[in-house]
Image (cartoon, helix red, strand yellow):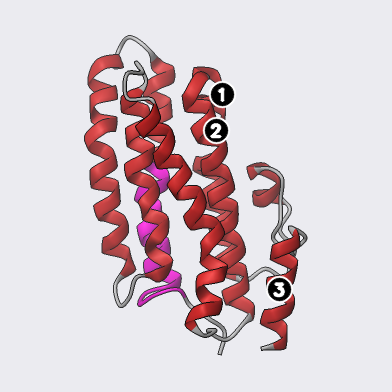
Amino acid sequence: TKRLETVKKQLASGAGPAASSSAPAAASGGSDGDSPAVQEYDGLVSQYIKPYLDHSKKIGDVVQQQADLVLKAIEEQRKLISVASQSKKPDDATLQSLIKPCSDLMGKIVEIREKNRPSKLFNNLSAISEGISALGWVVVSPAPSPFVNEARGSSEFYSNRILKEFKGKDQLQCDWVASWNGFLKDLAPYIKKFHTTGLTWNP
């Protein structure tokens, strides 16, 4: 319990062991003490989220604004996975406080879509807004993996529209879709491997 409280305080101050200011740092800056679950999550971030951020920056406008929030949500989820790898499962109130930062960011990501419905980039905003719900797997049991696949299906409804519109016309948009879809696709097997019945805590 003391260890969990210490980590909670670190997270609150932004100085936790997993705190990072960018996706590449999160991916390459992990210490040897990180659990395999954290290291593999970093691998997903490096493989998919970093390119997604790069593509979003090139597209710009509200897509980039939304991507900045996605990065923060991913970082918060990484912190939670790191806490879980070091701590026993806490009581519900403590768990909610640990989940809240990521949850709040997910809400802001959806807000950007809702505030920009007339945007020509609405399909991009919607693909992310639908897919970001996948990060809610940390509170799903006993089968979080199918939950992620459902979110991916909702996201692909919009990303398929993007591919239909831009395939053969704008490779940047197609690459953007590939990076985001890749993350959601590989998140499910990652969860099956490390968090089969729910977020794995350290007994």
Contact between marks 1 and 2 (CB within 8 A): the answer is: yes
Which label was assigned to residue 53?
2
In the image, taking residue 20 as reference, residue 52 lies left or right, namely: left
Residue receiving disc 3: 7
Does residue 52 appear anywhere in the picture? no
Residue 149 percent location from the top left of the image: 27, 54
The residue shown at (48%, 24%) is 62
The span from disc 1 to disc 2 (Cα, nearest Å) is: 6 Å
The span from disc 2 to disc 3 (Cα, nearest Å) is: 28 Å
Amino acid type, mark 3:
Val
Residue 160 percent location from the top left of the image: 24, 30
Residue 181 percent location from the top left of the image: 36, 40
Residue receiving disc 1: 57
Choose top left, top right, bottom left or bottom right for residue 189: bottom left
Q: Is residue 22 magenta?
A: no
Does residue 191 appear anywhere in the picture? yes
Q: Which mark is first along the chain, 1 or 3?
A: 3
Q: Is residue 187 magenta?
A: yes
Amino acid type, mark 2:
Leu
Residue that lies at the very extreme toward the front in this rendered image: 115
Amino acid type, mark 1:
Lys
Mark 1 crowdedness (10 Å alpha carbons): few <14, some 14-19, many ≥20: some
Specify the quadrant that holds the C terminus: bottom right
Contact between marks 2 and 3 (CB within 8 A): the answer is: no
Secondary structure category for the residue under label 1: helix
In the image, taking residue 183 as reference, residue 41 lies left or right, namely: right
The span from disc 3 to disc 1 (Cα, nearest Å) is: 33 Å
